[in-house]
Amino acid sequence: MLSALKKIFQPKAAEEGQVALQPPGQPFPWPRGTRLTALETVVIVIPAAAVGPEEKIGSVILGDADMEIRPPQKPGDPYIYLRLKEGSSVSLSKSVQGMIAAEDKRPRKIRVNQKEEPNQSSQTTTGSSAPDRV
């Protein structure tokens, strides 16, 4: 009975998605709407160009309240730094190439929850690299 109650009240978002081990310094594709959840403290770098000159940073970067954002410090700075604490999540309204920033080479653990676009077909095509769903 207790386990049944735990399943009802336990948040499921933290359990969904795939866990990725991302090495620092290696770019990775970050499709718009995909939510990344830090499973440990992590700094993610995105291009400053992701936020246009007429856009507000909050219209592109959608994250938890405890996420720290370091925008470009001067014109021409190429990156925005997002510091996530364990359990913090962030998604973007645009697709970018992200990268983990760290002083060491140890891969960081993040959970990836992909949002399906409403106009995408759920059918797989021949030669698709998407994993089969069970």
Image: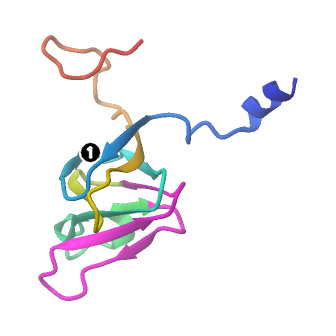
Question: Where does the N terminus fall, quadrant-wise?
Answer: top right
Q: Identify the residue at image location x=28%, y=68%.
A: 103
The amino acid pointed to by label 1 is Pro
In the displayed structure, 115 sits above or below 128; it is below
Residue 81 lies left or right of residue 113; in this view the side is left
Instruction: Please say if 52 is above or below 20.
Output: below
Residue 106 image point, x, y percent: 32, 54
Q: Quadrant of residue 132?
A: top left
Q: Is residue 45 left or right of residue 83?
A: left
Q: Determine the secondary structure under disc 1.
A: loop
Residue 87 % position (x, y): 54, 54
Q: Residue at the spot x=23%, y=75% of the render?
A: 54
x and y, in percent, of residue 15 in the image: 55, 36
Relative to residue 123, is residue 90 drawn left or right? Answer: right
Q: Please report the residue visible at 61 percent of the width from the left and 36 percent of the height from the top.
A: 12
- Read off the residue under disc 1: 31
Please check the rendered image and state whether residue 83 is part of the magenta-colored stretch, yes or no.
yes
Given residues 128 and 26, the one toward you in this image is: 26
Task: Look at the picture and state if 39 lies above or below 52.
Answer: above
Q: Nearer the viewer, residue 31 or 68?
A: 68
The span shown in magenta is 63-91
